[in-house]
Image (cartoon, helix red, strand yellow):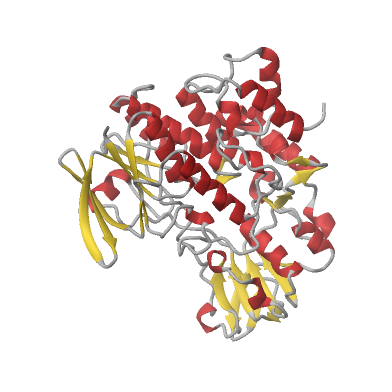
Amino acid sequence: MQQVAIIGAGPGGIAAARWLKAQGFAPRMFEAHTAPGGQWAPDNPNSGIWPGMVTNTFSEATRFSDQPWPEGTPLFPHNAQVLAYMRRYAEAHGLLADATFGCRLTGIAQEDGGYALTFTQDGATRTEYFPRVVIACGRFNTPVLPPIPGADRFTGACGIVHSFDYKDPDLYRGRHVIVAGGSISALEIASDLAMLGAASVHLTQRRQRYVNPKMITGVPLEYYAFTYDRAVLCLGDDKQALAANDEALVHQYAGDPSRYGAPNPHPEFRRAGVTGSQHYLNLVAEGRVIPAPWITAIDGRRVTFEDGHTIEADGIVAGTGFALNLPFLSEPMRQTLAVTDSAMMLDEFTFHPDLPGLAFMGMWSQMGSYPVPLEQQARFLAYTWGGVIPRDAAQMRAGVAACATEGHHLGYRRQNEMALRFARLCGTDPAGQVDPDLMRRLRQSATTGVMYRLAGPDALPDGPDAFTAQFDRYGPAA
């Protein structure tokens, strides 16, 4: 069995190991933290979760296809439940026995047809050689703080932190807090603070986005926004139809933020953008979160906004994104991949023809949950290396060219789009392979792992029944 080094034991690394093992490889996970789970392990220095964090995606879209959630799991699981799920999954597939924890990759270079990997562990450095390597160390572990004049002179007692380092809501109890950014994490933290005792919460952002809720009349948002049909639109050529569909959906289910007391979004829908939070707009309507324009200056505790008004703040939390950070890549590899702080050139987000035997997992920014697309990417990776769907250098070069022309790493991809993209590569897209009546329901379904175990390699015998039960339980009423 050929060994494969997998860097990272979070969801991406676990998914890659599970499917590579099924293809006859011997995966070995190397994890810098002392236990598996990646971002979902709160004691992991590379984790950005906070104690009360629950998923912003519903449970069936936040799991792998072959392990259901335990009975009684809430629709939006707590972070500890996600961590337990990932660890159970790794144990169930026998992935931990050969894993190494507390071991950090510090260097990787091409050598003798494979890769030399340099690790540090317990103060010692060693090098190991592998014919194949999967980089699954996560996309969201290097926070970016925006440049704000005077930020270095802020004297508020709670300081300025990135949302990645927001760990203790009690620190802000009774304090005046500014949350900066319009991302989901910014809105969720602002909501968290407002409901957990902050004296005041201002949310400052460059533009007002539309805000999708998690649930719509008892149905998870995924059954409206992240369906199979909408994935087909995403991957099609008619971008005007996609934009019109997006706008109609948001106006129907999210509504106008200004009706709640938030600023007016930009009149051009695409420039306004979309984010998500179940509570944020209601808290704005109650006056418990106060929208503000962007910060222009800081002097001591005094913070000035673009409209000229000022407030005294005790703390600032910035939910302002992450940089792509792969410091262990050798310089020749970085040049081959054209790595920047936001992008690199890959064939189908996974391979490069000049780096055979190397693959990347989950290195894109995305709206929606990651487990389903990661599982499909892991299958694409494993099926390619296992010979189920061979992919030659010419195909990979075309894929790298498409990465540039299609702007694969510009902005955010979508959960349903990425899952269908990889499923088509794997031959597991159910279109044309399942009963027409079943396909009609699939087209209207949220994107879940089960829907890509109905046809093609590794189809589940009970897949149609499992999908039907899932749709009947969570989907919109007929």
Viewer-nearest residue: 77 or 350: 77
Name the residue at 35% across, 50% down.
339
Q: In which quarter of the image is the C terminus?
A: top right
Residue 248's spot in the image, x, y percent?
A: 75, 37
Q: Is residue 238 visible?
A: no
Q: Quadrant of the N terminus?
A: top left
Q: Look at the picture and state if 347 lies above or below 102.
A: above
Name the residue at 67% across, 13% down.
436
Q: In this view, does 55 lie to the left or right of 343?
A: right
Q: In which quarter of the image is residue 370?
A: top right
Name the residue at 59% across, 64% down.
50
Q: Quadrant of residue 287?
A: bottom right
Q: Look at the picture and state if 336 lies above or below 43.
A: above
Q: In which quarter of the image is residue 127?
A: bottom left
Residue 281's spot in the image, x, y percent?
A: 78, 57
Q: Can residue 227 be seen in this view?
A: yes
Q: Is residue 464 left or right of residue 215?
A: left
Q: How many marks?
A: 0
Name the residue at 71% across, 23% down.
441
Residue 35's spot in the image, x, y percent?
A: 44, 56
Residue 54's spot in the image, x, y percent?
A: 65, 55
